[in-house]
Image: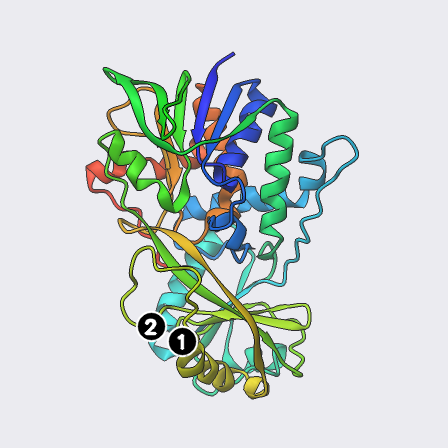
């Protein structure tokens, strides 16, 4: 039985641990410095899933993950405890003015070639389907007709951890600060308290905090913590059939029961590690609310009920995940830098990483190899929200 040590117990680490223990009988230890996961992207994610990407690799990962989410109650059951993830599939709706219409058509052709159930809607069709939507300045919309929506991400994270533990994985509270190495092999993780945790294989799954661990192995992982604010809005307006709408401005909104969730790009410089407790309410007042009111006139009457912030683990190289063997190392791997789509792809990536760590082929994540950093081969993703 191989012994695998994972550094980081967020959803990516928990999913990898689950599949390693459940499917491969591995002896798994997950090292996590904060078992409350208070600042983890897994706890603060919007937890949406889509197939409207520009890269076939991302489409395939999200398609696999969606199929898993649909059967997660069976896959992740522990005795009679079956996780409820609240998956709904109202779709994503990308909107474009005349300036963006050609790009949207190009993406549509690629997505259809990959089997994505997506439709292009002209302004008249948009107005007929979503009468609450202002379409005067729009040229086109791209609507996912199936396989897109949102779910309870923290519940998925808990379910992966619980299933992993039930299958024998251990979650250890410790702060990993370095590694013991010999030649091209890692032999142990060094912790801040002086402890060493050995293994046959190691994987960095520490999300936005993966870069320092990569640096300890001489690998520059261009992964940065980028804060994104989410606003929870109360409104008397009803938006029947509301999907997750991405406005041409870059702002987005979706329904959440009787509430609306909304957010968008930050104001000013997108700094690293901005404090999560400092919500930029000026972003809402100056940009988001005017955008919402113009796109959905009924939303002129709303108020902010609450807000939160979480980190994108942004891969500055090409806005796509890094998953696979670390260059120069025989038994060190990573899965990080998913740039806002880590939660939705965690089932597929965790399953694939488990196969890779068990010595099997993992074609689903082949395109995400960290080797592309050294080769200068970016896998650019155009559809980053």
Indicate the secondary structure of the residue bearing disc 1. helix
Q: Is residue 278 above or below residue 2?
A: below
Q: Residue at x 49, y 29 (%)?
A: 30
Q: Is residue 259 left or right of residue 124?
A: right
Q: Dot 2 surroundings within 10 Å: few (below 14), some, or many (20 or more)?
A: few
Tell me which corner region of the image, top left, top right, bottom left or bottom right, holds residue 79: top right
Disc 2 target residue: 267
- Residue in front for this viewpoint, 64 or 271: 271
Q: Residue at x 66, y 45 (%)?
A: 70
Disc 1 target residue: 283
- Asked if one can make out residue 327 in the rendered structure from this viewpoint, the answer is yes
In the picture as drawn, the residue positioned furthest to the top comes out as: 1
Q: Gap in Å between the C-alphas at discs 2 and 1?
A: 6 Å
Indicate the secondary structure of the residue bearing disc 2. loop
Q: Is residue 180 left or right of residue 114?
A: left
Whether label 2 touches label 1, CB < 8 Å: yes
């Amino acid at each position: 039985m191989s012994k695998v040590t994972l550094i980081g117990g967020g959803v990516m680490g928990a999913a990898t641990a689950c599949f390693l223990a459940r499917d491969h009988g591995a002896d798994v230890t997950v090292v996590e410095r904060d078992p409350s996961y208070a600042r983890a992207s897994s706890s603060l994610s919007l937890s949406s899933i889509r197939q409207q990407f520009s890269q076939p690799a991302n489409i395939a990962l999200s398609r696999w993950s969606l199929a898993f989410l649909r059967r997660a109650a069976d896959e992740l059951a522990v005795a009679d405890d079956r996780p409820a993830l609240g998956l709904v599939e109202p779709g994503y709706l990308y909107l474009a003015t005349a300036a963006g219409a050609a790009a949207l058509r190009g993406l549509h052709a690629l997505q259809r070639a990959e089997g994505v159930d997506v439709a292009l809607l002209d302004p008249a069709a948009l107005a007929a389907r979503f009468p609450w939507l202002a379409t005067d300045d729009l040229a086109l919309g791209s609507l996912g007709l199936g396989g897109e929506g949102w779910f309870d991400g923290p519940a998925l994270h808990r379910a992966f951890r619980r299933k992993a533990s039930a299958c024998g994985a251990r979650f250890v509270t410790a702060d990993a600060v370095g590694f013991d190495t010999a030649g091209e092999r890692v032999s142990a993780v060094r912790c801040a308290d002086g402890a060493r945790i050995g293994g046959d294989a190691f994987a960095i799954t520490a999300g936005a905090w993966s870069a320092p661990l990569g640096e300890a192995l001489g690998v520059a992982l261009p992964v940065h913590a980028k804060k994104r604010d989410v606003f929870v809005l109360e409104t008397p307006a009803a938006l029947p059939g509301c999907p997750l709408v991405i406005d041409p401005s870059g702002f987005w909104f979706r329904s959440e029961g009787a509430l609306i969730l909304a957010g968008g790009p930050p104001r000013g410089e997108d700094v690293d590690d901005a404090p999560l407790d400092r919500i930029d309410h000026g972003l809402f007042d100056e940009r988001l609310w005017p955008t919402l009111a113009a796109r959905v006139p009924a939303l002129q009457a709303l108020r902010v009920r609450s807000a939160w912030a979480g980190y994108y683990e942004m891969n500055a190289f090409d806005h796509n995940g890094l998953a696979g063997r670390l260059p120069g190392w025989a038994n060190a791997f990573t899965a990080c830098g998913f740039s806002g789509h880590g939660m939705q792809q965690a089932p597929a990536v965790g399953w694939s990483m488990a196969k890779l760590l068990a010595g099997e082929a993992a074609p689903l994540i082949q395109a995400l190899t960290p080797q592309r950093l050294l080769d200068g081969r970016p896998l650019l993703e155009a559809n980053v929200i």
